Amino acid sequence: MTSDTLPPVPPADVLVVGAGLAALRTVAALRDHGYDGRVRVLGAEGLAPYDRPPLSKHLLDRPSPTWLADDLGHDLHALADEVHLARPARRLHPLADGGAVVGTDEGDVRAACVVLATGAHAVAVPGWQARTLHTAADADGLRAALTPGRRRLVVVGAGWIGAEVAGVAAAAGHDVTVLEARDAPLGTALGARIGALTAPWYAAAGVDLRTGAQVDRVDDEGVHLADGTHLPADAVLVAVGALPATGWLGETLPLRGRAVPVDASYRVLGAAGPLPGLLAVGDVAVRRSARHGWVPGGHWDEAMHGPDVLVRHLLGRPLDRPEPAPYVFSTQLGHDVTMFGLPSPDDAVRVLGDPTGAGWTALWSRGDVVTGVLVVDRPRDVGAARRLFARADLPRLDLPRDPATPLPDDLRTLLRT
């Protein structure tokens, strides 16, 4: 056996920076795979790990966080040797011999292995008197602004979060207007053509959607558009995306689009290759994938399943499944929306079924390679799409070269042809 095939030596101790889903799953995976070294956790919010998707999907009917200890059965305090939920990391100093020193207001913390799992933060617009939605505290504030009685809510951004909140608020009887700078909702994620298919959902849900709307400013009188339109509002939510929480890193690591670049083992990549004893997972990272290229961490499956892959590589345990495919699930405006894969803007896209009917599916491809699938209100196609991406390589289908050529109405039938 050569030195290249020897199993890795487990680190003496592991410091996990962050206390969200990715951090909790990292600690749980360490213990599940038999790691008996010292594990410490540094959090920033002062709260035990909770699930973020319900903050928007269940903004008004779940006033308390969905604790991951209840959902996943992982008790962070029982699994880790030290847990500091209100001790945010302020700076990072990687060490040449492996690991790093993490600076905090209460002093430095040194570890042989440091896992960065600080997540992301909502994008805010300087000078705007508006709310964002990413934390439990954000949800508490927005929920309070929408009670009591019927309120006027303006949402800036028709992406995943904006659509979810708009639907929830409208269903509760509030007057909701959504402003989108692009020509269609979800244009960044789905492209204009597919995003436009979701536009009729807004009116059907009682929401006033305005595309091509350029916001000039937001103040205590409401929202002012560039064309002079003024929209009075009791609450304004800016939902224009999230960014990896890497500001505290300064210039200590080379970033890629503000995210920490990692390899398939979640090792942080420096200029000359992986940095010893330094890993990153979840929203803070962007992973180099042989299947998808660079995969951003802002996917629930990355935070849920990525830590197990990280720990298996760290401890020399065999992998038992292909890498997770990028996955998004959203409940918005009365529709269930599920997406697998990571299509590019120039990929061909086909629609299976009638977008005005009970359900439909969009399929992105590059030649005969399927790069993404979006399923709307079709549970069986969700299962078919999940199986399609449950392989080591991107799936291939015998598709007509002309995207206008008719295809079967659903993905299950297409896979059988």
Image (spheres, rainbow, N blue to C red):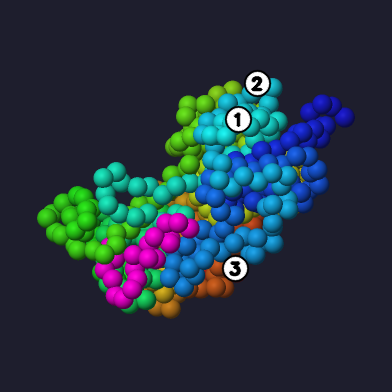
Mark 1 Cα-neighbour bin, 10 Å: few <14, some 14–19, many ≥20: some
Mark 2 Cα-neighbour bin, 10 Å: few <14, some 14–19, many ≥20: few
Instruction: Determine which residue is flagged by label 1.
Output: 108
Query: Mark 1 or mark 2, which is nearer to you?
Result: 1
What kind of residue is marked 2?
Ala
Q: Earlier in the sequence, mark 1 or mark 3?
A: 1
Residue at point 54%, 37% (across, down): 89
Residue at point 82%, 26% (across, down): 3
CB contact under 8 Å: marks 1 and 3: no
Report how far apart the C-alphas of labels 1 and 3 lie in the structure.
Answer: 47 Å
Segment colored magenta:
136-154
Query: Mark 1 or mark 3, which is nearer to you?
Result: 1
Kind of element beneath mark 2: loop
What kind of residue is marked 3?
Gly
Q: Position of residue 159 (x, y in %)?
A: 37, 58
Q: Position of residue 238 (x, y in %)?
A: 33, 55
What kind of residue is marked 1?
Asp
Q: Position of residue 307 (x, y in %)?
A: 65, 47
Residue at point 29%, 66% (across, down): 153
